[in-house]
Amino acid sequence: MNMLINTAGTVVADALRGMAAAHPELVVDAENRVIVRRDAPVAGKVGLVSGGGSGHEPLHGGFVGPGMLDAACPGEVFTSPVPDQMVRAAAAVDSGSGVLFVVKNYTGDVLNFAMAADLAEEEGLRVASVLVDDDVAVTDSLFTAGRRGTGATLFVEKIAGAAAEEGAPLERVEAVARQVVTGTRSFGVALAPVTTPAKGTPTFELPAGELELGIGIHGEPGRERRPMMTSHEIADVAVDAILADLRPDAPVLALVNGMGATPLLELYGFNAEVQRALAGRGVAVVRTLVGNYVTSLDMAGCSVTLCQIDEELLRLWDAPVQTPGLRWGR
Amino acid sequence: MSETALDAAFFIRWMTAAAASIDREADRLTELDSPIGDADHGSNMQRGFAAVRKLLETAAPQTPGAVLTAAGRQLISTVGGASGPLYGTLLRRAGKVLGDAERVTPAELNAALAAGVDAVAQLGGAAPGDKTMLDALVPAVGAGAAFDAAAAAAAEGALATVPLQARKGRASYLGERSIGHQDPGATSSALLFAALPEAAK
């Protein structure tokens, strides 16, 4: 597999140096692997910190900036960052108003953020954590690690980020984040497997002419494999899987997300089918985002995320945001 | 063997031997992690244990407990993923139990590692049979103070994960499809215990 890299071992460090060069509005500490908005800590503001394995760009580093995250901690590819990074990030963004950790539900992220929260509290910081677990492809049971955190992360970071930017206290920012988590579900599909730089060959086999339904963002296999389907059929499967788990009784925000290697042309066509499927099932969509936001390196495929909102959450969604990956309003 | 007292130099040899073995086996660990994980266990453990080796070369802790505590802290700071906190907790807890004794017996080491394994089970919320590192660690500490027996039990435990269905960690998303693969975490745990008799030579 041809990759635009120097060596597999320097992929993350090289990307961080490039981010630093492209985004002077961020402080990118490539050595300690922390990305912080340049004006942090912002007086009176709750600090929002997230992080996770690299390979999901723009998540999380691309969502650092006014109206969203205050800091992000990139780990190695598909590997949770370490507590040292999170504690450093928390200290950098804490204005005395406390810090909220946004944690995707993977064993590694959960363990490292929990250790970091303990260490930060020992240093006198006030830390709350919210766990994002939106992927309906995984049965949430005692026999699994629980639903994975995927597309909902973008909604949590944007909406809780807007609340924090307005000066809401930690308890309120945490409650908003939890409300988003509770009302958000995702379902993903892979059309071609993912190749990590460390391995250099696909991490799973997916023959041409087949697709994997219920894929995770690290190439974890999903619910089942089927012969290739049309965009129309995939939209029906994804929407039905989500609605079987959470039937919205309010309008939704929709994220039609690319996994990395699927062209926008196809994603927009898929969005047309998602909107058709939702309209046909009586679900009202008030805002839609189409693009590569929560990716899986070079995996081909897509995911659908639906976030049930009320007027207040919609207002926070529409609030200005200025980050490398998401930018509107002023 | 049980008469022999183990000093800090032994523990440094143990960690160094473990680092060398993880380094040799890194590609195999990553290969095992591909079908049921995300193909990075080898490279993550390799990075962590290389950092442990480097730390022990420069810092040279003076007691067995200090060696394990420093190694555990270093793993937490450098491995990431679930393996970092879990392996880090195993060594840190064992190091704490050993306290500041300058020499410890194999039986004391066995008891300390048993406490470390308990801490891993508590942190990860897993039990033997869940297809995790515990499937190598629990039999290893259960085999007693003799290093050869512990190493053999760990290796056997790792092999015995093949027919199991994963209930914890990323492999659990696969459900029944996780059956038929050896658990990479149990395999690296077996390498850690295989380094014990090596260090005693």
Image (tube, coloured by chain):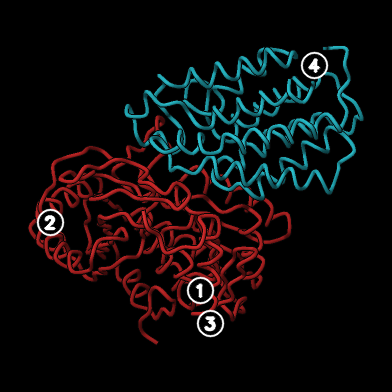
Chain colours: A red, B cyan
| Mark in front: 1 vs 3 | 1
Q: Distance between the residues labelled 2 and 4?
A: 63 Å
Q: In front: mark 2 or mark 1?
A: 1
* Classed neighbour count for the residue bearing mark 4: other residues with Cα under 10 Å, few (<14), some (14–19), many (≥20): some
| Label 1: element kind | helix
Q: Which residue lies furthest to the bottom in this view?
A: A330
Q: To which chain does the residue with label 2 belong? A: A
Q: How far apart are marks 3 and 4 (CA)?
A: 57 Å
Q: Is residue A158 left or right of residue A210?
A: right
Please say if the residues under marks 1 and 4 sit with CB atoms less than 8 Å apart. Answer: no
Q: Mark 1 points at which residue?
A: A19
Question: What's the residue type where badge 4 is placed?
Answer: Ala
> How far apart in space, not on screen, are marks 1 and 4 (Cα)?
52 Å
Chain letter of the residue beneath label 4 in the structure image: B
Q: Mark 2 points at which residue?
A: A231
Q: What residue type is labelled 1?
A: Met
The numbered disc on residue B136 is: none
Cα distance between the residues tagged 2 and 3: 39 Å
User: Percent x, y for residue A176?
Assistant: 43, 63
Identify the mark nearer the N-term, 2 or 1.
1
Which residue is at the front of the view, A319 or A148?
A: A148
Q: Distance between the residues labelled 2 and 1?
A: 34 Å
**Percent position of residue B176, x then y:** 32, 26
* Residue that mark 4 sits on: B107
Residue positioned 67% across, 36% down in the render: B20
The residue under label 3 is A25
Is residue A132 found left or right of A287 in the rendered image? right
Identify which amino acid the numbered label 2 is placed on.
Ser
Mark 3 secondary-structure assignment: loop
Q: Which of B34 and A57 is in front in this view?
A: B34
